[in-house]
Image (spheres, rainbow, N blue to C red):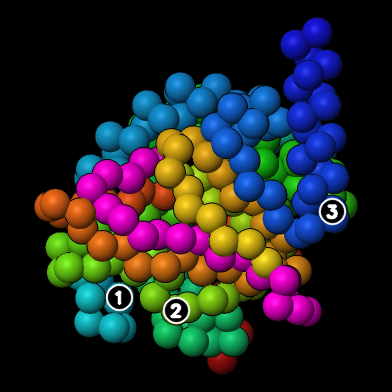
Amino acid sequence: MVQARMDEARRELMTRLQGEGYAVLSGAQAGAALTLELAGLLALRESWERLPRDAYLRDGGHYRSRRHSCYMFTPASGALEAVTHRAHWQPTSYNALHGGMQRWFEPIESEVSASPAWRQLLSSCGGLFAQLQAVSRWHIEAHQFRIDTTGGIGRPTPEGAHRDGVDFVAVILMGRRGVSGGETRVFDVRSSSGVRFTMEEPGSMLLMDDARVIHETSPIQAQDQQGVRDTLVLTYRAAGFQAPEPA
């Protein structure tokens, strides 16, 4: 009975992604559809307290901290492996503000990267996306983000509405406290149709087909004192990691 409910949740999720190009899930829905042990995943939240400051913000802000690591996932075998630490790079066509430069962030802590819940999440999302797009291997970039209100406001997406230049994106809310705002907007790339919502429940997720939708999240403001919004962003790309063209 439990397995039947999980299978049905996964079918419903795939139908939503195929139909709309995105899906918003509560923690319970994500756990059922992706066979996740959410308690183990949310137990990793304390690592967000140790994220180094992002030194590459071109708007002069100091509101973002992050770590970044890369992995490869083979759907046929279920093998997930970390790759040698590398820079994060995007073309300016996808990120007009921070594109075109190699950004070297500190890697995700080894205890986090090796945890069963972390590996389960990356593998489960990779398996789901492989059912939507045939692929031999996913190139995954994982980003731990903390946006805070030290300077009054924090900008989760300083580059504005954008695509990431990958195949699929997963955004997981790890937690938020002491803030207002942070409304997420997802719109069809071919029209003005879309949705607006605010992720507030730890473990809730947004899954997107990056070729079909654009997304952004509005600034956060402090309520009574400094607040934070913690997310994990995973990107899946079949055609290798994004990198500058060789000279």
- Which image quadrant for residue 190? bottom right
- Label for residue 56? 1
Asked if residue 235 lies in the magenta stretch, the reply is no
Inspect the image, locate mark 1, and give the three-letter code of the amino acid beneath it.
Tyr
Q: Is 100 or 45 nearer to us in this picture?
A: 45
Mark 2 secondary-structure assignment: loop
In 3D space, how far apart are the residues under numbered discs 2 and 1 (Cα atoms)? 13 Å
2 and 1 marks in contact (CB < 8 Å): no
Q: Is residue 87 visible?
A: no
Examine the residues drawn in magenta and state their main secondary structure.
strand
The residue at the point 55 percent across, 22 percent down is 37
Q: Which residue is mark 3?
A: 18
The residue at the point 30 percent across, 75 percent down is 56
In 3D space, how far apart are the residues under numbered discs 2 and 3 (Cα atoms)? 27 Å
Mark 3 secondary-structure assignment: helix
Residue 231's spot in the image, x, y percent?
42, 49
Residue 61's spot in the image, x, y percent?
23, 76
Nearest to the eye among marks 2 and 1: give it: 2
Which region shows up in magenta? 174-193
* Circle 3 crowding by C-alpha within 10 Å: few under 14, some 14–19, many from 20: some
- Which image quadrant for residue 45? top left
- Label for residue 43? none
Inspect the image, locate mark 3, and give the three-letter code of the amino acid beneath it.
Gln
Inspect the image, locate mark 2, and give the three-letter code of the amino acid beneath it.
Glu
* Circle 1 crowding by C-alpha within 10 Å: few under 14, some 14–19, many from 20: some
Mark 1 secondary-structure assignment: loop
Q: Which residue is mark 2?
A: 159
Q: Earlier in the sequence, mark 2 or mark 1?
A: 1
Position of residue 120 relative to residue 178, above or below, is: above
